[in-house]
Image (cartoon, rainbow, N blue to C red):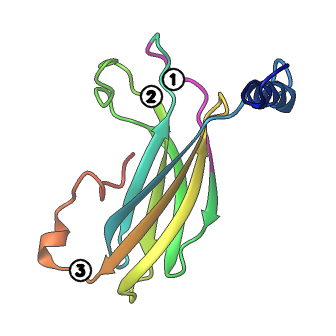
Amino acid sequence: MIRLNHLSKLAFVLAGSLAIPVGVALAQSNSAYRSADAVAGKSERLGVYGNVQKDCTSGPLPTVRVVTPPKHGELNVRSGTLKVGRITRCPKLAPKAQGIFYKANPSYKGPDEVSYEVRSASGKVEAHTVRITVKDTSPADAKPTPDTDPDL
């Protein structure tokens, strides 16, 4: 006689093996939620995404998909090349990358939000949601910071 405890474990194992066919890889998924500040009418870099291989070469760029566009501005994806030295473990590499940039309407102040997904060549998906606070320009905002640098 088999106890119920053993049957439930057996059913779980069988169901698990039946639910995922042999040889099928599951895509990994991560989610990130954060906030950012932006100045009305100026471009703000929200993220930079690339693919650096173990041998310090650039791999295939990830695919970026906008899930929720901003209500009070625009979201742009730009491809480019990072400056040499930006990747610590590969100091001589200038890798290809994609940058995500938000630009609020020039006369808008207040909250905005964007969501986008980044899918790597291996199938890994990262979902990003960014809550943005848009403010007026001020003299302190005139100096470029790493996030407001128009380059990747």
**Gap in angstroms between the C-alphas marked 2 and 1:** 5 Å
Task: State the residue in front, 1 or 40.
Answer: 1
Q: Earlier in the sequence, mark 1 or mark 3?
A: 1
Task: Report which residue position mark 1 lands on.
Answer: 58
Residue at 52 percent across and 67 percent down: it is 114
SS at mark 1?
A: loop
Q: Position of residue 38 (x, y in %)?
A: 32, 71
Task: Categorize mark 1 by other alpha carbons within 10 Å: few (<14), some (14-19), many (20+).
Answer: some
For this orientation, the residue located farthest to the front is 1
At horizontal 33% and vertical 27% (from top left) the residue drawn is 87
Residue 78 is labelled as: none
Dot 2 and dot 1 residues touching (CB under 8 Å): yes
Q: As rendered, which of 86 and 47 lies closer to the eye?
A: 47
Distance between the Cα atoms at labels 1 and 3? 37 Å
Picture residue at 48% right of the left edge, 40% below the top: 49
Q: Is residue 146 magenta?
A: no
Mark 3, Cα crowd under 10 Å, few <14 / some 14-19 / many 20+, is some
Q: CA distance from mark 3 to mark 2?
A: 33 Å
Q: As drawn, which residue projects farthest toward the top?
A: 55
Label 3 sits on a secondary structure element that is loop
What amino acid type is highlighted by mark number 2?
Pro
Q: Nearer the viewer, residue 7 or 96?
A: 7
Circle 2 residue = 95
Q: Mark 3 and 2 residues: CB-CB less than 8 Å, in contact?
A: no
The residue segment tinted magenta is 56-64
Q: As shown in the figure, which amino acid type bears the numbered disc 1?
A: Ser
Residue on which the image places disc 3: 137
